[in-house]
Image: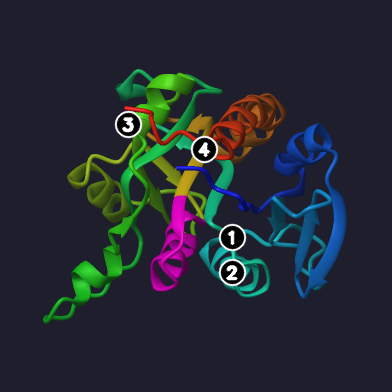
Amino acid sequence: MQYKRIAILMAMEQEALPIIEYYKLKKTAFFNPVVIYSNKDESIVLSLNGKSTEFGIDNIGSQAGTLNAYITIQNYSPDIIVNCGTAGGFSNKDTEIGDVFISNSRIIYHDRRISLPGGYTEYGIGFYKTINSDFIAKKLQLKQGLISTGDAFDLNEYDLKVMQENNVDVKEMEAAGIAWVCQLYNIDFTALKAITDFVDKPHKTGEDFLKNLNYASKRLKNKAVELIDYLSTDNSSAA
């Protein structure tokens, strides 16, 4: 399948700059707080969560990602949304800093604790669909895994329990919110995440994240370019 309009949704400006510079995207619109970059024919739209006016920092987390997805769909009607960003991985799964994962079959939440009967527990976890990435992962030499979203940068025992029970490979902060909106509007979705730190090792998460952010962002850009080029080409004969 060939996607004629691809929207790339990202949270942090530093993560996005290598992709913006590679495609020579220009800032073309602002829908408070979302900032839009695109090429001339808008076949590639990169949508940033924007900045917090109160704190002057990037809007991160599932709340900002959900709003970004809604704004992007309403204004650009993309054929597919690709959520690109950095994330935490698991060292016990043979993962290395800079490895880039593409989502496999679904995205979940690990921190939405809704202990009510009648499906609320399952609703909290989410289980949002993504495109089949089996062939893409093999062709582009990407690692493939289940991505889980939470709004806390650190980790507690319950979050870890949910991730272990669902065999999670990547922990991040926005994909499930975006995937939910895509599912509501029947828009194809996938996520691409580069690893900056390890969830399952004693470490200072914030320090490791900042130390590895530049390297992981460059690795993310390289694979994002390959993925976007693949998605924008007619691959109907791929098997």
Q: Which residues are drawn in magenta?
A: 174-189
Vertical side of 210 occupied by 105: above or below: below
Q: Tell me which numbered mark, 2 or 1, is placed earlier along the sequence.
A: 2
Q: CA distance from mark 4 to mark 3?
A: 16 Å
* Left or right of residue 188: residue 217: right
**What is the secondary structure assignment of the residue under circle 3?**
helix
Is there CB contact under 8 Å for labels 3 and 2?
no
Q: Tell me which numbered mark, 2 or 4, is placed earlier along the sequence.
A: 2
- Residue type at tag 3: Asp
Instruction: Name which residue lies at 40% across and 73% down.
Output: 184
Give the percent coordinates (x, y) of residue 222.
65, 25
Q: CA distance from mark 4 to mark 1?
A: 20 Å
List the residue tagged with mark 1: 78
Rendered image: mark on residue 193 = 4
List the residue tagged with mark 3: 134
Q: CA distance from mark 2 to mark 4?
A: 21 Å
Instruction: Name which residue lies at 29% across and 50% down.
Output: 157
Is there CB contact under 8 Å for labels 4 and 3?
no
